[in-house]
Amino acid sequence: MKKFILKRLLWMIPTVLGVCVLVFTIMYFAPGDPTGIILGPNATDAQINALRDSLGLNDPFFVRLWNYLKSVFFHLDFGTSYTTGVSVVKELAERLPRTLMLGIISIAVSIVLGIPIGIYAATHQNKASDYISMAIALLGSAVPGFWFALVLVIVFAYQLNWFPAYGMGSWIYWVLPIISNSFAAVGLQARQARSSMLEVIRSDYITMARSKGVPHWKVIYKHALPNALIPLITTAGSQFANSLAGGLLVEKIFSIPGVGNYLVAAVNNRDYPVVQGSIIIIAVSFSIIMLLTDLVMAAVDPNIKSQFASGGRK
């Protein structure tokens, strides 16, 4: 297990390096000049060239790339925002907990709601409750997250005035963002739970348990459910990553001061250090999430456990 963890941690280095190079290259060739936004439309050519020199924007591509990679990997420095003059690392340190909180709560809601819906649909296959549950799940998967967020704002914030439409404050400010960010994940978890449960229910050992007269609830929750939950762990890990990505637009819609709001504003302002630093942090978060998912799978799946055990003896 220690070798597995070390190997995955080492694989994060080329992954993050690749993300750094890719994002830097995209921003380098992207049209537009951030100095025009910083200085305004009335800036002279001399002022623009002086600012470009001070920011290093006139350097060749490989010189700028090397300087950026050196700052990121050797000094953990993502640079300073062009528009605010504040360190990108400092801003991300303040905003990342809010983004992670939104993603964690959203995936928790999707697990708490989606898995029971899927199990109920599987145990009532081809009945009205099964069709209704899957219709809701398909609706959650089909509706775009940003559109659903806007509908929630219009209905529950402006029409009914039950929840605030934007901003940060007490728990009530988090209700609409969490609902909009978890709606699609609930549908996916429900469909995955139904499919996994149906596959397990049809297994021979479940048939044997029923033939022995084991009560229905015991067959489902003691024998079938533990094995059906194993594939859902991988789904939950990928959905957690998707919740972080989907939360970027949700933060913008609800004016949550997280990484997503920070990133969208930076894209509009061509604030290169902020865009690059935000995407790198998101990539690192994705890598850590997938590592934790693999570790949980290794802890609960007997097949993976045996592979590690045999590998350790060798």
Image: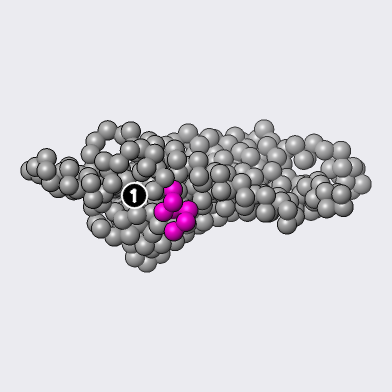
Q: Which quarter of the picture shows residue 186?
A: top right
Residue 97 spot, x, y in % from top left: 44, 61
Magenta-drawn segment? 69-75
Q: Position of residue 280 (x, y in %)?
A: 45, 48
Residue 304 falls left or right of residue 90: right
Which sits in the foreground, 120 or 82? 82
Circle 1 sits on which residue?
273
What amino acid does circle 1 point to?
Answer: Pro
Q: In which quadrant of the rendered image does the N terminus lie? A: bottom right
Secondary structure type for disc 1: helix
Is 164 on the left or on the right of 70, as rendered? Answer: left
Q: Nearer the viewer, residue 286 or 52?
A: 52
Q: Residues within 10 Å of mark 1 (few under 14, many from 20)?
A: many
- Picture residue at 84% right of the left edge, 43% below the top: 206
Q: Provide the major secondary structure of the magenta segment.
A: helix
Q: Residue at x 57, y 40 (%)?
A: 188
